[in-house]
Amino acid sequence: MANDISGSLRKLTIEGISYNVASDANFTEMLTSFENSMIASSGKNMRKMVKRVKTVEGVVLLTNADERIALIAVAESIDDLKLSYTNAAGDTYKAEGTIEIEAHETEENKTNCIMLPRGDWTAFVG
């Protein structure tokens, strides 16, 4: 049975490098592969399904200069990266894909990223 524990992430790894996650970071996970909507018609509404990437957004890392240089290098790599994160319940999610660096805030050395998997996230429930 899965644990119903919430809280900060325990660990985030990109290409074998573990990064410190901000304690107040709240990742947003896209759990489904499709965006659903309805289209009005003269009879019943028609369902429209659009394929989407199961992103993990709002990834806030606490980074020093060396870590930012490493992040930039992997974000600009054309090869898929090994991505993983472990949540407060101990569940680990892994995928191959890439990251997008959105911004860096100098006041608290926070680097904001999005993790973009090539396929689905594989769950290893703790």
Image (cartoon, grey):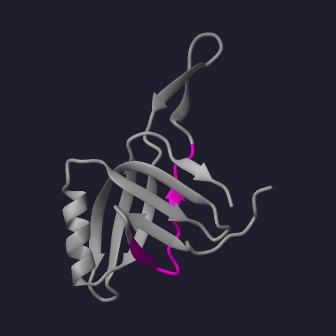
As drawn, 30 above or below 114:
above
Q: Which corner quadrant holds the C terminus?
A: bottom right
As drawn, 64 above or below 95:
below
Residue at x 45% of width, y 31% of height: 51
Quadrant position of residue 66: bottom left
Q: Could you say where residue 37 lies in the image, as x and y percent from the top left? A: 55, 31
As drawn, 47 above or below 31:
above
Q: Could you say where residue 76 lies in the image, as x and y percent from the top left? A: 19, 56
Pick the front one: 47 or 53: 53
Q: Residue furthest top?
A: 43
Residue 119 relative to residue 39: left or right: left
Q: Which corner quadrant holds the N terminus?
A: bottom right
As drawn, 119 above or below 104:
above
Residue at x 59% of width, y 10% of height: 42
Q: How many marks?
A: 0
Is residue 28 found inside the magenta-colored segment of the image? yes
Residue at x 32% of width, y 74% of height: 111
Quadrant position of residue 100: bottom left
Residue 84 relative to residue 45: left or right: left
Residue 113 relative to residue 51: left or right: left
Residue 67 relative to residue 45: left or right: left
First to last magenta residue range? 18-31
Residue at x 43% of width, y 39% of height: 119
Q: Could you say where residue 60 lies in the image, as x and y percent from the top left? A: 41, 72
Is residue 36 found inside the magenta-colored segment of the image? no
Q: Residue furthest right?
A: 1
